Every structure is written in structure tokens, then in C-alpha cells.
């Protein structure tokens, strides 16, 4: 008998993902023990898995690797995305420890699902094949669907989970159909081979339609207009810690995958998708900011804010070259710290034994809890883009990349929208510092882990705003492998 030849499997490129998935399996085992295990131990194991994945990612910087016949590509681009994803997930785990104890079930399945979704995000950023991209997207999405409805007694959570699932499945069908058409046009699902097969065939009808369907699927995952309708309801109904993960980690992974597909596989079709994304970016940032003005619920306000920020990031995708995607990577890092911090403040506040999520709940917060009010104010000012915070530098790099690439009017629309956004962000600051609460206002719920997460996020937005150059240079260098 001829011995069965096993293909070589490179473990190195898989190490960060394997650490996260291994921690998820360990969390499930701890949760199954006959004697109850405290939520602090389970959360510590989950956090240790994320820190281990982050360290493994940093250890592999500058050492690109491929696995499974180039289906998984762990280059510097994927490594930078992993850093953003791991930071976001770690902050979410820290915010969840006391938040779950007050508001929901203290089970290990929550942390396991967070880790599984994080593993999917990391695989999504490193996918070198459309099949792996689809599988990673489903691993991430299915975990998030369950997490959104984790608070089973809350009708809003169940509604959010169902809407997220139904619309997500609908968008996934578009993505899968687009993959099928691209395979039909090129005969492969490998991104590098698609680029070679599509050279000189940019206007092939199958390829163009497949690209359009792919953009529909990605548009849902990043919540760009007109595929944003799920975001406000899901952000409002899901547990606040889960909302933070959806707003940061899933967006970072989906945008990283979108950039890899467009820059690596469909570079020859750039004139087509750049025009389309120009329009989508302008409409997305405008709709997000205009509708956010009318919101009184902070979670819905931040949902429309996140839609607007997707519009800003699409400016970098349109700009192309190394400057545009590099600016997007840097912006994702600043956005992860800022948004996780803003939602983190919400997890630490309650009013009348319930979450404080209305803008009016934060009236007079500066007098009762000045440090917490200052933290939320800084996060909101960073989202506006006020120097010297990270949000200002991130927007500067995005708009500068657009101007250098010749997209002056798109940069102008971005600047105008940034000024428009100042109204609804500063309205919250005005309530905290210049209004008196009607009744008992929001109060702080002490949490050491939550406070530590907010401190890390604050340090992040200040550091990235004051000393941005090293991180921006790393983001630019991370894009280089895609342009070869």
C-alpha cells in the first residue's frame, strides 16, 4: 500500500488564532466543571488568551508566513489588524466582568463566544482565499448573532439578535453568490490567482457583477449606507459590551478583508470600484451624521456615529496606493480605543437599577463623577477630531491621503461632515457639564476591571494623538505586502 502523504501544515502563521481558539475551548471546559468556577477566573483565562495572541502577533512582526497553500496569509497587514482586534476584544472582556454580573447571566459561554468571534475576525483579516474569507466571516458573525441576544429576558436583545441574524444571512447570500461569480470568471478563489486571471479583463461581466455582490456583502458587515439599517437596532438592543465588540473588532476585520480583496485580487478593476466607493463614502458619512443629530439614546447615537466613521474610512480605501489603506489601518487603531472607551463608560453607569443610555441620564454627571465625565468627554472629543487626541490625527491622515490622490471634493465632504458631527457629540458634553438631571441621574457602578479598561483606552487616544508617527509608519509599512 502506498502510504498516505499528509500535506505540510505551517503552525507559525496559525499561532495567534490557535491561541485564541484554544482559550475559547478552555473557557468552555471550565464552565462545564461540576463545581462552579467564578466569572473572574473564566474572564482571566479569556483575557490571557487574547494577551497571548497579541504577544504572538507582535513576535511575528516582519516574519510573513502562509499556510494551507496560501489560503491563509499572515503578513504585516494581517498582523496589524490582529493588534487592533486583540486590543478591542481585550478591552471588551475587561468591561464585561462586572457588567455581566449586574445585567446578565454569568456563564462561560459569553467569553467563549467573544473568543470564537475574535478568532473569526483574525482569520478574516488574514484570508488569502475567498473560501477562507467566507468561513471566517461566518465564524465571526454566528458568534455575534448569539451574543447580541444573550440577555434572553430582554425583548430588545432578542429583537436585535433576530434582526442581525436575518439581515446578516441575507447579506451573506450576496457575498457567497459574488464569490461564485468571481470563481466562474477566473477559475479560482485564491486572491493572488484571481489578480493574475483578471488582468486585462476588468470589464468581464461576470467579474463586475461578482465584485458588486461582494461589495454588498462587505457593505453590510461594515454598516455602510444603504446596508446600515441593522446597526442602530442591534447596537441599542445588544448588551453594551457586545455592542462595543461589534463596533470595533468586527468593523476592523471586515475593513481589513475588504482592503485585501480590493487591493490584492481586484486591483485591475480599481477605476470601477473607486467611483462606486466614492459615492458610498460620501453618502455614508452624511447620512450617519445627519441622522445622529436626532438621537436621544446614546447607543443609537454611537451607532449612527459608527456609520459615519465607516464613511471616513472608505475615503482611505478610495484614495488607494499605500497612503490610503495605511491611513485606514491607523484610523482603525484610534477608533478601536475611542469607541471601546465610549461604550465602556456606558457599562459603568446606571440609573434606577437599569443601564443609563439616554443622553438626559448624563445631565450633571460632571458634578457627581468628574473623572468619569472627563473620560467620556475626551472620548467624544476624539470622535469629533479635536487635537491633540487620536481622532484628529486619524482623520488628518485619511483626508491628506485623499487630497494627494486627487480626491479633493471627497476630502472636503469629510471635513464638512466632521464639523457637522461636533453638534451631537458636544451636546452630550453640554448635558454633562451644563445641565441638571431630572430626578436621580446616572451613577457610577464601581468596577476595577472596567476602570482599568477605560484607563488603557484613555492612554491609547492620548498617545496616538501626541506621538502618532511610529504607529502611522507601522500602518504604512503593513500595507506594503499588498502592493507587490
Image: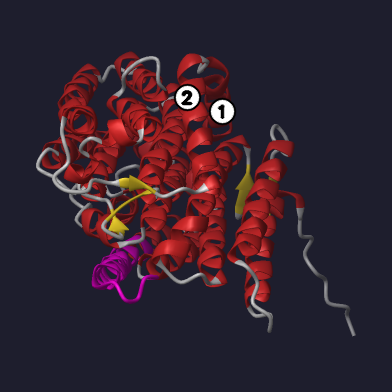
Q: Dot 1: few (<14), some (14–19), or many (≥20) neighbours within 10 Å?
A: some
Q: Is residue 406 left or right of residue 359?
A: right
Magenta stretch holds residue 390: no
Query: Residue 231 location, x and y as percent?
Result: 25, 54
Span of residues in magenta: 150-176
- Number of on-image labels: 2
- SS at badge 2: loop
Please tell me which of labels 2 and 1 falls first in the chain: 2
Residue ID at (38%, 67%): 145
One can see residue 69 in this view: no
Residue 431 vertical placement versus 33 (above, below):
above
Residue 217 location (% of width, % of height): 32, 56
Decide which of 166, 316 is in the foreground and name it.
166
Report the magenta stretch's main SS.
helix
Q: Which mark is residue 322?
A: 2
Residue beneath label 1, please? 480
Label 1 near label 2: C-beta < 8 Å?
yes
Residue 308 in picture, x, y percent from top left: 24, 37
Amino acid at each position: 500500500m502506498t502510504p498516505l502523504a499528509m500535506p505540510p501544515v505551517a503552525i507559525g502563521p496559525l499561532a495567534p488564532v490557535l491561541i485564541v481558539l484554544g482559550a475559547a475551548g478552555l473557557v468552555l471546559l471550565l464552565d462545564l466543571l461540576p463545581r462552579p468556577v467564578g466569572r473572574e477566573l473564566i474572564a482571566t483565562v479569556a483575557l490571557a488568551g487574547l494577551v497571548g495572541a497579541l504577544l504572538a502577533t507582535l513576535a511575528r512582526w516582519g516574519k510573513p508566513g502562509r499556510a494551507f497553500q496560501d489560503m491563509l496569509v499572515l503578513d504585516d497587514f494581517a498582523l496589524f489588524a490582529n493588534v487592533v482586534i486583540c486590543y478591542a476584544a481585550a478591552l471588551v472582556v475587561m468591561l464585561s466582568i462586572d457588567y455581566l454580573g449586574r445585567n446578565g447571566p454569568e456563564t462561560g459561554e459569553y467569553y467563549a463566544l467573544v473568543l470564537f468571534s475574535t478568532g473569526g475576525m483574525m482569520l478574516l483579516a488574514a484570508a488569502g482565499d475567498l473560501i477562507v474569507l467566507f468561513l471566517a466571516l461566518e465564524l465571526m458573525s454566528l458568534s455575534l448573532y448569539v451574543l447580541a441576544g444573550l440577555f434572553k429576558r430582554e425583548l430588545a436583545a432578542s429583537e436585535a439578535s433576530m434582526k442581525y441574524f436575518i439581515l446578516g444571512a441575507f447579506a451573506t447570500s450576496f457575498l457567497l453568490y459574488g464569490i461564485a461569480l468571481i470563481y466562474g470568471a477566473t477559475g479560482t478563489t485564491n486572491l493572488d490567482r484571481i489578480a493574475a486571471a483578471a488582468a486585462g479583463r476588468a470589464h468581464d461581466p461576470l467579474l463586475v457583477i461578482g465584485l458588486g455582490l461582494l461589495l454588498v456583502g462587505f457593505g453590510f458587515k461594515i454598516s455602510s449606507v444603504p446596508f446600515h439599517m441593522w446597526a442602530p437596532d442591534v447596537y441599542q438592543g445588544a448588551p453594551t459590551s457586545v455592542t462595543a465588540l461589534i463596533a470595533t473588532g468586527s468593523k476592523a476585520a471586515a475593513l481589513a478583508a475588504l482592503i485585501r480583496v480590493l487591493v490584492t485580487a481586484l486591483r485591475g478593476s480599481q477605476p470601477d470600484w473607486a467611483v462606486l466607493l466614492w459615492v458610498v463614502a460620501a453618502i455614508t458619512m452624511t447620512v450617519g451624521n445627519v441622522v445622529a443629530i436626532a438621537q436621544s439614546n446614546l447607543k443609537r447615537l454611537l451607532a449612527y456615529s459608527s456609520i459615519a466613521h465607516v464613511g471616513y474610512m472608505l475615503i482611505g480605501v478610495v484614495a488607494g496606493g499605500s497612503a490610503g489603506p495605511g491611513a485606514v489601518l491607523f484610523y482603525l487603531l484610534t477608533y478601536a480605543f475611542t469607541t471601546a472607551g465610549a461604550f465602556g463608560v456606558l457599562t459603568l453607569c446606571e440609573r434606577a437599577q437599569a443601564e443609563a443610555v439616554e443622553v438626559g441620564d448624563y445631565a450633571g454627571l460632571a458634578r457627581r463623577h468628574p473623572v468619569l465625565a472627563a473620560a467620556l468627554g475626551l472620548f467624544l472629543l476624539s470622535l469629533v477630531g479635536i487635537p491633540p487626541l487620536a481622532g484628529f490625527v486619524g482623520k488628518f491622515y485619511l483626508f491628506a491621503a485623499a487630497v494627494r490622490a486627487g480626491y479633493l471634493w471627497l476630502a472636503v465632504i469629510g471635513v464638512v461632515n466632521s464639523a457637522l458631527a461636533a453638534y451631537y457629540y458636544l451636546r452630550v458634553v453640554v448635558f454633562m457639564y451644563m445641565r441638571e438631571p431630572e430626578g436621580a441621574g446616572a451613577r457610577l457602578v464601581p468596577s476595577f476591571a472596567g476602570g482599568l479598561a477605560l484607563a488603557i483606552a484613555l492612554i491609547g487616544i492620548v498617545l496616538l494623538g501626541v506621538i502618532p508617527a511610529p504607529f502611522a509608519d507601522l500602518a504604512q509599512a503593513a500595507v506594503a505586502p499588498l502592493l507587490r
